[in-house]
Amino acid sequence: MIIRRAVILPVVLMVIILLGLLGAAFSFRIHADNAATQAVANRLQTRLAAEAGVEWVKLLLRTGRLERSVWYQNPAAFNRVILWARDEDSKVAGTNRRLDEDMAFRFSIVADDLTDDKKYIRFGLIDEASKLNLNLATEAQLTKLVTAAAIGDKLVKVDEVVNAILDWRDADNEPRSLSGGAEGEYYRRLDKPYLVKNGPFDTVEELLLVRGVTANLLYGEDFDRNGLLTDNEDDGGETFPPDNEDGLLNQGLYPYLTVLSYETNVSNANRARVSLLGDENALRSALEVAFPDEPTVVEFCVSATRPGAAGNTPPGQDNPNGTDSPSNGQPPQDGRTPAGANPSGSRNPAQGGGGPSGQGGGGGDRPVGSSLLPGVFDLPYNTDIEGAKRAALAQRRPDDPSQPPDTSGIAPGTGDAGSQDAQTETPAGTDTEDAQGDAPVDETDDPGNAENEGENDDQTSDATNPSSPIRSQAYLMFPRTMIDGVVRESPVGPEHLPALVDLTTLLPPETREVAGLINVNTAPRLVLSCIEGLTSDQVDAIVSERDALDDETLATTAWLVTTGILDTETFARIASQITARAQQFRIQSIGFADHIGTVTRLEVIVDMNGPIAETIYYRDISYLGAPFPIREEDREEQNAR
């Protein structure tokens, strides 16, 4: 009996221990499930905070899209905005005031400050027009970007990469280069074969499918894509990503390329622009509203843009001078005209496109032809000026070499019937690239030919040639213009240019949208340097001056002239490549809280074609981490200007 009692005690103790273990396990499981539920709830709340940031941006853009100060750099509206805080009045929500000892869910809208590669970010948006359009970029422009992104990477062969990109987007199956091109045969021979696109890029990330384009080339050393040089991005090969440990951040191609930049062909007041070469009554009415007290300016602008004045041709009529008119080709079916496209299908030697309209670099309904807009913008800026001069000199009358060449049957400023206009020469001191974009054009007369000295000057400058056809609103400011056979002085000054640029157009009336324009108000130096016709000094002047200008001044591209950065001839040369506004905006919204470290990071692109924003790109990139430290104790403000 005593033995039985001795056995019962350990059994009871064992049962008690087992029950304790079961209780502890159950409690641990409950706490784990509760923590997981709380983590999911926190994650959901930060995601909702990030999405609220996106909606907040859409609301601001409804009325502030044309005001750079509203969306470009606005910490008051985009930095640490409170969505919810415990025991806080609902009227306080939306402010960014600091709450140190309580929970508060917030969002911030951040963007990379491309003027700095190491320390600073912006609290604002990135407009897609500040980038180069991948589907419309020329070979020379792509070469410039790839060269910059491949610095320090000896494995990248720039020419091969550029040819492969152009082969991917063109419509044919012929490689551009036997060594560097890449069409269907190359991709079919891969270990994991796939088809070549032979069409426009749908996203910039699609470049990773192109021969020679690696993640290092596309994203550079900026693994977390925040524009800040972090320790792991400057330590050589010690940690990922690989870098060259040079103290500089190579951001690759990604920040400088887009496939989503276009704008509607309307004024800033959202009214259809009036064609300078179109209906006379409509043009006169629009100009009388713009310049009510200046009838002389109105009459001059109307007269200077009529048929027969300076070789102009209205849309829909043949040009008697032999130059292309806006009606020489049909616009894309969707009404969108690529900046840099010629609907007639002619191909600029420097162009990356692979064929005629509908088959060029843009592919499909986004053709790529010459480097300018269609019709009156059909002359590339990188014209072989010396070649045009030699062709003109060859036509001198053999009986009297001192006489000017016989230009009968030749369009004004052209060397022969098939050459481009030689009047697009840049002024002395301006860097110009040849048709391949490889070397500057010598814009001086041939020193070895005495006959060249002092002659043909009028053929090399639109500003001094009264017979120059109108190819930009700035042409109306040129000192002399031929009207009805009489040279007239222009009353149009820089003060008139903003209204002319905003209210009028040289595009055909059916053109509803223009793709690929570069926003000079926001584009970084590297993208601005891709504008054919700008020198490096002019690019630096644009970047240094624009931040000090107000929204009214920046409303049109005319500020480049009114501030004295560009002369009227240079502005006229680049006018068809640039814009001063944006329609597609990239939003990088991060949702977070003061009391936890959970962060949601969203990248969204919206199209503000009208008052309602259309989301055209949406991606959760939380796996890359927060773009900057999110709490006050992490000293986040050191990373913002």
Image: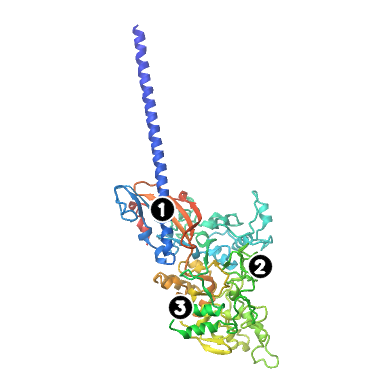
Could you say where residue 342 lies in the image, as x and y percent from the top left?
61, 71
According to the image, label 3 marks what residue? 290
Sequence-wise, which precedes: disc 2 or disc 3? 3
Q: What whole-number distance in Å separates the C-alpha atoms at marks 1 and 2?
A: 45 Å
Q: Is residue 344 above or below residue 4?
A: below
Q: Residue furthest right?
A: 398
| Residue 451, percent from left and from top | 63, 89
| Image position of 251 with respect to 426: above or below | above
Q: Residue at 60%, 57% (x, y): give it.
A: 212
Alpha carbon distance from label 3 to label 1 = 41 Å
Camera-side mark, 1 or 2 = 1
| Amino acid type at mark 2 | Pro
Assess disc 1: are there few (<14), some (14-19) or many (≥20) residues with their C-alpha within 10 Å of its C-alpha: some
- The picture places residue 106, in percent across and down from the top left corner, at 37, 52
- Describe the element under mark 2 as helix, strand or loop: loop
Mark 2 touches mark 3? (CB < 8 Å): no
Q: Earlier in the sequence, mark 3 or mark 1?
A: 1
How many neighbours does mark 2 have within 10 angstroms: few (below 14), some (14-19), or many (20 or more)? many
- Which numbered dot is residue 356? 2
- Tell me which amino acid carries mark 1: Ala
Tag 1 secondary structure? helix
Mark 3: which secondary structure?
A: helix
**Image check: 332 left or right of 242?**
right
Label 1 sits on residue: 52
Q: Amino acid at mark 3?
A: Ala
Q: Height in image: 552 above or below 213? A: below
The N terminus lies in quadrant: top left
For marks 2 and 3, give the one nearer the viewer: 3
Pair 3/1: label in front: 3
- The quarter of the image holding the C terminus is bottom left
